[in-house]
Image: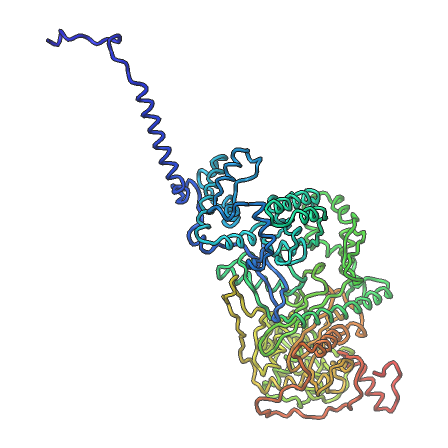
Amino acid sequence: MSASEQPKTTRATRPPRRWPNIVSRTVWGFFVVGVGIFLLYPILVKSNFLFLFGKSPSLEEMENPKVEQASELYTADGVLIGKYFRENRSPVPFNKISPVLVKALIATEDIRYYDHSGIDLTALARAVAGGGRNGGGSTITQQLAKNLYKIRRGERGLLGHIPVVSTLISKTKEWLTAVELEKRYTKEEILRMYINTVEYGSQAFGIKVAAKTFFSTSPDSLKPEEAAMLVGMLNNPTAFNPRFHPEAALKRRNLVLERMGQANVLPAKVIDSLQQEPIALQYRVERHIDGPDTYFRGAVSQFVNKWCEANGYDMYRDGLKIYTTIDSRMQQHAEDAVQDRMKKLQQQFDRFWKNRGGNPWVDDKGKEIPGFIETQMKRTDQYKALAARYQGQPARLDSALHAKRPMKVFTWKGDGDTTLILSPLDSLAYYKHFLHAGMMTMDPFTGHVKAWVGGINFRFFKYDHVKQGRRQAGSTFKPFVYLTALDNGYTPCDRIRDQRVTINYVENGKDMEWQPDNVTREYTGINMTLRHAMARSVNSVTAQLTEKVGWENVAKYAHKVGITSPLLPVPSIGLGSGGDVNVYEMVDAYSTFVNNGFQSEPQFITRIEDRNGNVIKQFDPKQKRAIPSETAWLMLYMLRGGMDEPGGTSQALWEYDLWKKDNQIGGKTGTTSNYSDGWYMGVTKDLVTGVWVGGEDRSIHFYGSQQGEGGRMALPIFGTYMEKLYKDEELDITMGPFPKPTSKITKKYICVSDSEPRRRREEAVDTIATDNLLEQLNTEGIAPPDSLKL
């Protein structure tokens, strides 16, 4: 048959297409692909295929989960004094957790906990079928996975931004992680991690902090009703917080007790009885930096934070244990001594200015400084914020500064809050009336800081007067002049006459002249030994000696022994006007004299451990030879002159119970111009202590030596403190003489002062006015009046 004869195919004669076969093949293809995707889906999620799903926990993270844990701060004698955290968590071992809490948790959150391997298919199906009304399908292990690895807050991937898909991916990660956890850990270990990880509300993470926050107890001492309350809160820590939602919390607690009854954790009668009990809270929330309010912690946190940043640690999450040099008992004695003295001194200060009928911010002539508070107000953050808010509206700004409202303020009446109706200007004026203090004690041989009191009340006054505050040191700087002299050929027995002098010098190319005055502008004319002159704090002798040894050398020697602040080499440097210093460096410098001439860097951290107790950093003492041992011992001898020499400025210490077992104490008082600052530096055979007292501003001060000298403001704190230390039998701090010199003393140091010794003083002074008058009266054979009998 030819081609032309072939029958033609028409639409009518064409065979029908096989549509069912095509559809079935397509469906089958989709089914195969779907099964493949379903089987591969977990692998794709776990591997974060094409960055679609976000990162999952790695094998290393599974083996070593990093839970945020509070770092803890300990004293040298093992007392916990603070925590640093973002999530307050302190894990405890499983055997320290109440068994009833564990049973309550399982009965409420995961009744088939011991029967599944991370995923409870029965609970999951029930949750899906009930639309969530029959409870959730998450197991304890899944919840641990979510909390431990922050799965829902971690990296989300490209698909993680699609609402429904993101939930599915997160759930998948939880399931996969839960299964992996079950492979690697026992059921007990998973429970321990969960109970120590989960949030209980009120910034409490983990059972230890939760038990303490809500019931002031430990995890192993929880009662059944308390355990039920804490387990109930896990479902919603905010909605079921008993402090803020007591009714909802009570219902939730009773539901947990009911579940405990159903699981035979407790007999039905006990459950019924417990459900009738009210919730008995002992509620106290720990703050993100918790512990007693101390200035010392601020210095520690600054130091440790810097170290952590340099070494890859996080102080607020890594659970470090930080061991300090502070002795909690000495710290308490120091705080008590400051509180005792400052409360009395403030009363004297207030009475003094009330009698004068004015405010304590005065100029050199004792006149109140006009506009002082308004000027000071402009330097505050509060003023700057108000000025920014009312920019170009001076009337509204002035109104805001004078607007009165109730304020809780500090008083010396006690721990209770006192509320006053004050404006911002009133509040500033109120606080400017207070005197402040800074005190530090150091072991001179190790450099360990043993006590640190930065102020009178950390809650109201955050400024640290140990390390932050810098003020002129007054006469406590004089020993550096005598140090320079002793190390350059002078002896304690060398003499300089107490007389008015004029010192010529050049400053910035200009000829200058300085005529230093004694405090009383009186001069005895006595040819004084250096020891006697330093003991009595005679300005004229110190100024002459400064000129002889060179004020540049005085600055150099001060820096050698521990002063780190900049010093201006001027003739008056020996009187403390060469620069501002702080208590911290003054204690360090004086410690060099006790430590045989070695300067020890102050140290307040001894070691840092990781959360497992491994030492990751040991801080060893750092010392260097600063001055010869002979010079150091002679300086101790010079400092003892404050007690031994007639008219010595430390002699108010005779009134304290410090003089048994041949005890020896050296020290130096200091007072700055207008009595703005009162200092006392005290040294014993074991310790060096520095004390500063003064107003917040240099314009705030007493107006007379009877109240405002270092011997009257700061020395009593030292005397009271040392009494407390010596009486504390738990401390290894004993009375006794200074050690004998370790090297041969080649310089003459035993010599007789020109003025006759008199009986011991009741009060120390940092001036020679009264001494001069008494000497004149004694010389003339006239009995002194009662007002001058000391």
- Note whether residue 579 is visible: no
Q: Residue at x 61, y 47 (%)?
A: 260
Q: Residue at x 82, y 65 (%)?
A: 350
Q: Residue furthest left?
A: 1
Q: Residue at x 66, y 58 (%)?
A: 217
71, 690: nearer the viewer:
71
- Quick check: 12 left or right of 358? left
The image shows residue 564 at horizontal and vertical percentages of: 59, 71
Q: Quadrant of the N terminus?
A: top left
Q: Is residue 415 above or below residue 116?
A: below
Q: Is residue 756 above or below residue 471?
A: below
Q: State which quadrant residue 89 falls in.
A: bottom right
The image shows residue 43 at horizontal and vertical percentages of: 38, 43
Q: Is residue 619 above or below residue 645?
A: above
Q: Quadrant of the C terminus?
A: bottom right
282, 567: nearer the viewer:
282
- Note whether residue 731 is visible: yes
Q: State which quadrant residue 685 falls in.
A: bottom right
The image shows residue 223 at horizontal and vertical percentages of: 66, 54
Q: How is the image coloured?
A: rainbow
Q: Is residue 170 above or below residue 74?
A: above
What is the count of numbered marks? 0
The image shows residue 724 at horizontal and vertical percentages of: 72, 76
379, 80: nearer the viewer:
80
